[in-house]
Amino acid sequence: MVPVPFKDMPKRITIFQGEFDGPITDEWMQHSLEGLDSDDVFHNSFLTGVIFACRAHTSCDLTGAAQELLKERGTAWVETCSDRADINAGLYVVCGEMLTPVSKLYDDTHGAFLHAIRPGGPHGKFLELKVAGSHCLRTLAVAVPSRAGPAPTPAFPLKGFRIAVKGIFEIENVRISVCNKAYYELYPPPKKTAACIQILIDAGATVVGTTKLASFAATEEPVECIDYDAPWNPRADGYQSPAGSSSGSGAAMAAYEWLDFTIGSDTSGSGRRPGHWNGCFAMRPTYGVLLSEGYVGSFKQFDTPTFYTRDLRKGKYFAESWYGKALSPPPRSGKPAIIYPTDYMSLISNKVQNDVIDAFVRDLESSLGVAHERISFNELWDSTTPEAANGMSLQEYMKDASRNSFFHDDYHSFDKFRKDYVQKFGKQPYLARQELSSKIAQEERNIAVDRLEVYRKWFTEHFLQVGKKDTLVLIPIEEISPRYRDEAPAYHFNPVGVPMLFVSPILGAPELTVPIGLSLYLSKVTGCEEKFPIAISILGSPGRDLELFDIASGCLKKCGRPDTVKPGKEMF
């Protein structure tokens, strides 16, 4: 809020800002008005009064033609001011003696949010927006700021961008739940925002809310979501799983045009699976480039913040602005390589999905000018078995490595929570499916972690070959098939060997999930043919994050494919 700079101001105000070498022309004014008309918060009544905020020693005079344009739009009051650091471009209302920036309320129609929040509390703290209901069952309206505010600058590259953050990251003054009632009841609101989210705020982004997830970032389908209802995936017939654990962030990005980016997290697929099922681009960054402080994690060796976008080009810009300076890209060899892992691709029995993937592979070959290599990891292991494996096959050596490492640390990362809850309430908190994890011994865990490292070194040497090749590995993520909200999963997550979604976490490598097509199915809900999203992931060597965006965007554009997806039912 800003003190009212003039007397007798109208109740609604638009502030324009700029540097002018001469009078404000009708061309400049027309361009600015067109920008306002495309803003979802703007209403023409905000042109009743107009302030031009100019730099010192510049002119704020309007040409006659510019004045006429404003008059045609109903402007009856115009003032100018200069060198006021507290006055920024945007839409405002006069409240008492203050100019207050305007936001628009959107309904959370797809149940993707935990909290709607806005800045404005004491010392800039976030405040929750509450309409009705308890913390589990709420009617939420999300307030989004006008895009007519200050434009991005090198100092604030994310100015004007609206983001939502998975409810596993701490936001100052906003109670965290990790989608578990017991956790919400136990701990007070954090006093500090997670380090990686603070980077976004410092870059100018506006956090409009926190999004739902599978409880404790586990793997849950909608019927398993006990304390909080699962978000609604907008694609296909509207009754398909949003996947997890970053389900709210994936569904929100696919559903809401008024969001620019959403933040998730990924340990063993939590960020990439929602990109696949909700039909949006998902990026798992190189491990370690984003700070983990203030992030309620599961397995520190894998835990990584992720993000979703509907536009590949904007996605690269966001990655550059968020963590680009922390990347250390490997030297380019100039020898691209495309690995098609037959062990993983053979797990996809959906012919349409396979055909869509193969068509994309051909396009990627054409774009990069290199033929793909069909490789069996299992077979290559047999001929290059690491000494530590003592002659064991890949499946035998890694059989329990992913499970025993991840499940053990995931369970014990919440030891303090369980202890704190019993101490305060005298009873156990509700936690689902903990039996297996609790029985994994420390020694079993340590053996498993050692084997992950053996696999990482082996894979890096034989496939990534940093400096010798610019290797890309294609990951199909999961087979796409109907997965209705009211159906229990056929099996519970229990990783054996090295599941395809564990490769990039083990390597610490970036992985970009790209929607590439659609698969038809007959919906039991609508009785009509509906369209599933189909995606592919592109994995590269650690540090190649930004290059993955260029490779994917270049391939899609060269081959006439869209490098953006639409919000709502239809991706393309």
Image (spheres, rainbow, N blue to C red):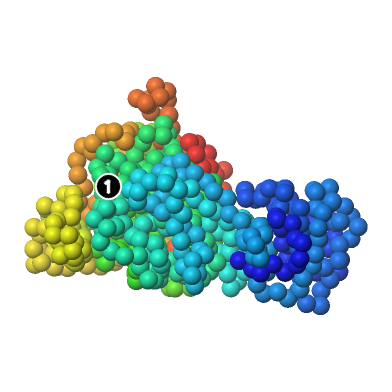
Q: Quadrant of residue 302?
A: bottom left
Name the spot of residue 325 as percent of width and height, x first.
48, 73
The residue lying furthest to the front in this view is 96
- The foreground one among 256 and 388 is 256
- The foreground one among 399 and 81 is 81
Left/right of residue 81 with respect to residue 288 in the rendered view: right
Q: Residue at x 34, y 60 (%)?
A: 176
Name the spot of residue 296 as percent of width and height, x first.
30, 63
Q: Residue at x 80, y 49 (%)?
A: 74
The residue lying furthest to the bottom in this view is 57
- In the depicted structure, whether residue 354 falls above or below residue 396: above
Amino acid type at image mark 1: Asp
Q: Residue at x 46, y 61 (%)?
A: 127
Left/right of residue 74 with respect to residue 434 in the rendered view: right
Residue assigned mark 1: 227
Q: Quadrant of residue 178?
A: bottom left
Crowd tier of the residue under label 1, counting other residues whose Cα lies within 10 Å: few below 14, some 14–19, many 20 or above: some
